[in-house]
Image (spheres, helix red, strand yellow):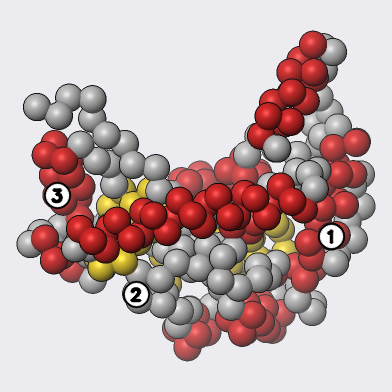
Amino acid sequence: MVQSLLKKQLLAIRNAKNQYALGCGVPDFNSAIAARFKKDTGLVLDPDKEVTVTSGCTEAIAATMLGLINPGDEVILFAPFYDSYEATLSVAGAKIKCITLQPPDFAVPIDELKSTISKNTRAILINTPHNPTVKMFTREELSTIASFCIDNDVLVFTDEVYYKLAFEMDHISMASLPGMYERTWAAAVALRAPDSYYVELKRDYMEKKAILAEGLKVLGFKVFPSSGTYFVIVDHTPFGMEIDIAFCEYLIKEVGALAIPTNVFYLNQKMRWKEFGEIHLLQRWKYSEDYS
């Protein structure tokens, strides 16, 4: 399947399909996205009015936030969170409120969420499957969040870029829940490919992720359950270091491996390690060429 995609890309280049495209996307591509969305969620989109193509989900999320968030609006994030969210919301002048998801299951603290929503809350941002905790938001969690949004006239931004990498449960799009279609702005990836492509993709990532997780367990890390994405969250404290950044620096200098400290995925990074000392390990390890 990968070779097939490469051949199609090469064919597009040779056919000179490389001019400036329409701002919202090429009609045929938009129609393909709408068709994929319908197949995955059951929802019908107007490809001419309800689909916009961007260069990656980060651009889609940024454009949506900057278009709908005004200075002073409150936006709720679930921490830890993908770092571009904070940067974009800061540019928009939003007031960010964070709700921390705690290990090992990273469940949504419903009571805290309910008390955090105020008359100034403009939107809640949901990332599922979640980066970096590898959590899948459950139907119960999404339904509860949806009810809060409907009751308080709050929008939902959903980052669903990893939705085809849901391993232990089916992915649920917030827009597919009752009453949420008209108040949900979703960023996702779409590809006109046979279902076999996604089956192979998921199987490939699951196999690689299992190898990584098992290897980390053998080394002595505590590996948290993973429901989606290609990331792995571990507890590094058995190795005698509490501060995640210090441990990641040690890995680079002494081991030749690269990990990402979860500290960087929080709004207030100072002393975050006291509450959450795990590190976020990418599936693809990076080794130093010089092992001396």
**Distance of label 3 from label 2 (alpha carbons):** 21 Å
x, y percentage for residue 211? 39, 54
Decide which of tag 1 and tag 3 comes sooner along the chain.
Answer: 1
From the viewer's perspective, is the residue at label 1 or at label 2 nearer? 1
The answer to whether marks 1 and 2 mark residues whose Cβ atoms lie closer than 8 Å is: no
Decide which of tag 3 and tag 2 comes sooner along the chain.
Answer: 2
Q: Work out which quarter of the rendered image holds the C terminus and state it.
A: top left
Seen in the picture, residue 285 relative to 215 is either above or below; the reply is above
Badge 2 marks a residue whose secondary structure is loop
**Distance of label 1 from label 2 (alpha carbons):** 33 Å
Extreme residue toward the bottom, this view: 111
Decide which of tag 1 and tag 2 comes sooner along the chain.
Answer: 1
Q: What's the amino acid at mark 1?
A: Lys
x, y percentage for residue 124? 58, 67
Seen in the picture, residue 257 relative to 247 is either above or below; the reply is above
Is residue 133 or residue 272 the one in the foreground? 133
Q: Tell me which residue sits at (69%, 52%) in the image.
A: 198
x, y percentage for residue 225? 40, 71
* Residue bearing the label numbered 2: 103
Residue 268 in sight here? no
Q: Tell me which residue sits at (17%, 24%) in the image.
A: 290
Is residue 154 or residue 198 the one in the foreground? 198
* Residue bearing the label numbered 1: 39
Is residue 38 or residue 78 the one in the foreground? 38
Residue 223 in the figure: left or right of residue 225: left
Q: Tell me which residue sits at (69%, 26%) in the image.
A: 6
